[in-house]
Image (cartoon, rainbow, N blue to C red):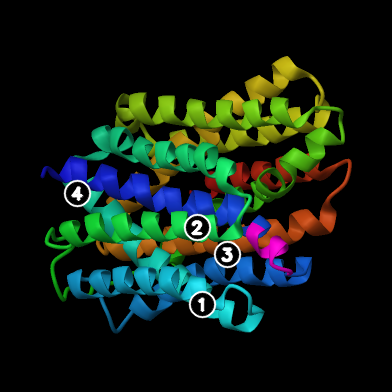
Amino acid sequence: MKIFSLVSAFYFFFFAIIGVYVIYLPKVLELVGYSPVEIGAVFALSPLMRFITPFFFLKKASLNRKIFKLSLLLLVSAAVLAFFTLESFYLFIIPNILLGISFAISLPYVETIALKYIGKERYGKSRLFGSLGFILIALVLAKFMNDPKYALWFLFLAVIFTALFGYLLSDIEAQKNGEILEFNLWKFWFLWVNLFLMQVSFGPFYNFFTIYETQHGLDYETISYLWTFGVVAEIVMLYFQGPLLRKNLFFILKLCTFLTSLRWLMLHLYPDNIFLLYISQSLHAFSFALYYSAAITLLFKLYENKTLAQQFFGGISFGLGGMAGSFLAGLFYGEYIFLYASFVAFLAFLILFKR
């Protein structure tokens, strides 16, 4: 099977896992009796582990095939343990820690393979299968939420297929086996700060967009259309972005960061204007899809240790940035929440001028 097909299949099922985990698992925990504080604590563990894990690879280890296979085993173990630990807050911590460690290893390994063998110009056409997996699980699983156990079965099946295609990819070398290359975060500190702040600015959107819009008079059906439209815009950009990634990647990051600040400002100023809300959601093509692709491509070019660069990308942005963004969004939620998000994204834009 061609590398493109294997990577695309891995993305499809990996992001289906993310779909179950992000969209439905919080509701499952609520149904079995978890308090809001317990749910928040559980969902802080995975991004925390994504942030911590890359530091173990700085000096003493390299992300090789053996460790990648081990991460797939941790992934399957987490899915199995979820069935037996779901109703115990303290025991359910274990599979969530395992998931976080696995995410921190498996996705960067595959991202490196994708950029190395598929190339930046075709990367988006492979990565869009991840978006399809995410949106498909969102549409299908909604029909089975009368029993919380169904979500665990969907999670388990997505994990099994992710591990299967990951195992088939494990024979492909992401980086020379045993090679430990120098890695310096400080050298491009402005880029890492930008990645962190961008994800912080997404905290209000991921956690409170639905709540925010219902408070401004929109119904759930309209809001679901807005969410779907954003993912469709993301998929279209991933398919057609190849020629854009031949351009100056720093300029693309600046453009996407600025448009993200504008996007959040539009949500603050016009929260009940349907036309402008769709315009805002169309910018997801830039603030997520193109930004994500440009960022990992730039890191691939800047760093010799390419797998570790991808690990820290996930750790600092979706790990540390995701945690901080969620916490601060809850702390500052109110009328000006998206004005705050716009300000954070604008800081991320300004920091890139320190290049």
Q: Nearer the viewer, residue 339 or 25?
A: 25
Q: Check if mark 1's residue and mark 3's residue have beta carbons within 8 Å.
A: no
In the picture, measured across the screen, residue 33 lies left or right of residue 194, that is right
Q: Residues within 10 Å of mark 4 (few under 14, many from 20)?
A: some
Q: Residues within 10 Å of mark 3 (few under 14, many from 20)?
A: many
Please give the residue where the numbered disc 3 appears in the rendered image.
320
Does dot 3 land on a helix, a strand or a loop? helix
Could you say where residue 264 lies in the image, as x and y percent from the top left?
71, 35
Please give the residue where the numbered disc 4 appears in the rendered image.
116
> Vertically, is 235 above or below 87?
above
Counting residues from the start of the chain, the first of labels 2 and 3 encountered is 2
Label of residue 266 in the image: none
In the picture, measured across the screen, residue 97 lies left or right of residue 114, that is right
At label 1, the amino acid type is Phe
Could you say where residue 231 lies in the image, as x and y percent from the top left?
52, 32
Q: Residues within 10 Å of mark 1 (few under 14, many from 20)?
A: few
Task: Assess whether residue 32 is covered by the magenta stretch.
Answer: yes
Q: Check if mark 4's residue and mark 2's residue have beta carbons within 8 Å.
A: no
Does dot 1 land on a helix, a strand or a loop? helix
Please tell me in which quadrant of the rendered image residue 287 appears: top right
